[in-house]
């Protein structure tokens, strides 16, 4: 312990990092303009999108985390960042952002201050970059707390950002990270001393973020269920599910974990899925898959986020499925803690459920959400839009993804209107304060200038007239 201030050397180092961030943020805000904030955000964006650096980050991520694959991480780094930069291009985050003559209220955008971002190992470059860009766009400084396996990627990313900052004369201390070795104590101290916590990752981290005493924006667990009904284009649905499930070896929280298929098209869908690289494991083989996927009650690291050949070998399926198999679809009807296939699998393994009709499929999806993943998202492949609306009206979910590859759609897409993000709020169902995709608005606050207006006080008849006519006075 440091006798002078009563804290350990590692905590004192963390405190110095936050102090430097505060100093840099104060200067950034004092010099602030929309052009400055935009320039800083673009610098961070180019730091990850420049092709040679993008590849280096992707290779480092796979090498150090053992999760995902390089081509898909390159795609993710590029598209997620490009989409985010598109989303924020015209966003006003400096000065007067609204001025309403009717209410007499003007709003001035203000930075939050220093952001503390807790990020996962599944996306050790893309998620920090997303948070960093949003923070800079709002005039903030940011300190990133990577997972232990994500440290090397985060160090590389921040090095690239500092190189871009040097070209523009921007303050390096606007973007920092907890230095290796990371620890829960350092992360806890960071969360307690910044102005806002952004947390993406394990539910343990989310709980700690939401109880640290600092305002926190955290996101919930994913466990995506997708319904395929009798009106769906089965070949298109199978192709989208295959592409989504296989992308980056299923590291995404938006990767399909269960598919519920109506009985009327079950066999036809299984055949369509086979043409897209999805191999069926009948229910008689489910117990062996479960034993190998959870050999000691925990997910098998030889299966998690691995290429198809490694996944098949670890599950004892090599040579038992067709060449070119991309993922396994395991038949099951069990849901809940005693049926692990109904939960998140972080691998190229799907649980495949059969439903008698749409209402049965909907009930199955509801049971899966009650077990795990409430609030995050569900999907449906259908030609009946009213069914999608019905899912949104009745299920505990913040997003219903319609006729799309779930992984590519949930976090924003160039073909839908959701904000590009790697962090999905899950509302009260997932224990979160937000029900939207994390985006730039969560990185700014506003001051309201309130002026007097002409009085607009209603009479009692105006307010209660319709009520009185029904219930009396």
Image (tube, rainbow, N blue to C red):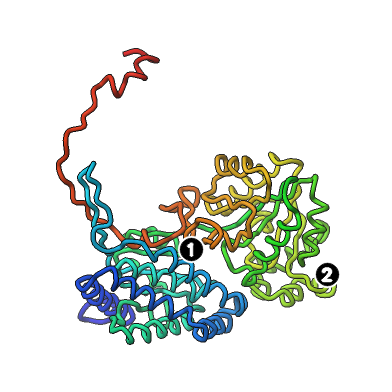
Give residue 321's mark: 2
In this view, the residue in front, 72 or 304, is: 72
- Look at 22% across and 55% down and name the residue there: 447
Give residue 172's mark: none
Q: Relative to 352, is 271 on the left or the right?
A: right
Residue 264 vs 69, above or below: the answer is above
Quarter-wise, where is residue 192 in the image? bottom left
Q: Relative to 389, is 137 on the left or the right?
A: left
Quarter-wise, where is residue 97 in the image? bottom left
Q: Secondary structure at mark 2?
A: loop
Residue 112 vs 56, above or below: the answer is above
Quick check: can you spot residue 207?
no
In this view, the residue in front, 410 or 51, is: 51
Quick check: can you spot residue 261?
yes
Please tell me whether mark 2 or mark 1 is closer to you in this view: 1
Q: Residue 6 at what x, y percent from top left?
A: 24, 76
In this view, the residue in front, 343 or 390, is: 390
Within-10-Å neighbours for mark 1: few <14, some 14–19, many 20+: many
Quarter of the figure that contains the C terminus: top left
Quarter of the figure that contains the N terminus: bottom left
Within-10-Å neighbours for mark 2: few <14, some 14–19, many 20+: some
Q: Residue 298 at what x, y percent from top left?
A: 63, 67
Q: Residue 133 at what x, y percent from top left?
A: 39, 71
Q: Which residue is mark 1?
A: 420
Q: Residue 391 at what x, y percent from top left?
A: 60, 43
- Look at 36% across and 64% down and name the residue there: 197
């Amino acid at each position: 312990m440091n006798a002078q201030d009563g804290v350990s050397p590692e905590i004192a180092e963390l405190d110095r990092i936050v102090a430097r961030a505060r100093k840099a943020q104060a200067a950034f805000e004092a010099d602030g303009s929309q052009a400055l904030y935009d320039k800083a955000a673009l610098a961070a964006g180019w730091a990850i999108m420049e092709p040679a650096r993008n590849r280096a980050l992707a290779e480092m991520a796979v090498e150090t985390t053992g999760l995902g694959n390089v081509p898909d991480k390159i795609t993710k780094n590029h598209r997620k960042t490009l989409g985010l930069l598109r989303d924020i291009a015209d966003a006003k985050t400096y000065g007067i952002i609204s001025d309403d003559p009717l209410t007499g209220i003007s709003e001035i955008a203000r930075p939050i201050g220093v952001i503390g971002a807790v990020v996962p190992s599944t996306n050790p470059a893309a998620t920090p970059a997303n948070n960093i860009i949003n923070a800079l766009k709002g005039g903030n400084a940011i300190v990133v707390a990577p997972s232990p396996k994500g440290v090397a990627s985060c160090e590389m990313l921040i090095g690239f950002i500092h190189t871009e900052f040097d070209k523009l004369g921007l303050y390096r201390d606007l973007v920092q990270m907890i230095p290796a070795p990371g620890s829960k104590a350092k992360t806890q101290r960071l969360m307690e001393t910044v102005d806002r916590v952004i947390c993406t990752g394990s539910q343990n981290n989310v709980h700690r973020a939401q109880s640290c005493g600092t305002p926190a924006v955290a996101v919930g667990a994913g466990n995506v269920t997708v319904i395929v009904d009798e009106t769906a284009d089965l070949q298109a649905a199978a192709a989208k599910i295959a592409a989504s499930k296989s992308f980056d070896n299923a590291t995404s929280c938006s990767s399909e974990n269960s598919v519920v298929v109506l009985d009327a098209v079950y066999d036809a869908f299984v055949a369509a899925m086979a043409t897209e690289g999805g191999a069926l494991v009948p229910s008689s083989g489910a117990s062996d898959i479960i034993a190998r996927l959870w050999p000691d009650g925990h997910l098998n690291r030889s299966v998690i986020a691995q290429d198809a050949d490694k996944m098949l070998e670890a599950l004892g399926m090599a040579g038992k499925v067709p060449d070119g198999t991309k993922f396994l679809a395991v038949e099951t009807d069990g849901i809940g803690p005693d049926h692990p296939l109904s939960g998140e699998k972080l691998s190229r393994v799907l649980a495949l459920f059969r439903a008698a009709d749409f209402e049965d499929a909907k009930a199955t999806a509801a049971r899966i959400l009650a077990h795990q993943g409430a609030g995050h998202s569900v999907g449906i492949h259908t030609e009946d839009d009213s069914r999608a609306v019905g899912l949104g009206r009745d299920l505990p979910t913040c997003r219903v993804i319609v006729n799309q590859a779930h992984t590519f759609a949930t976090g924003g897409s160039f073909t839908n209107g959701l904000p590009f993000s790697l962090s999905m709020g899950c509302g009260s169902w997932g224990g979160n304060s937000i029900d939207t995709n994390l985006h730039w608005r969560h990185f700014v606050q506003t001051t309201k200038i309130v002026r007097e207006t002409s009085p607009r006080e209603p009479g009692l008849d105006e307010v209660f007239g319709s009520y009185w006519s029904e219930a009396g006075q």
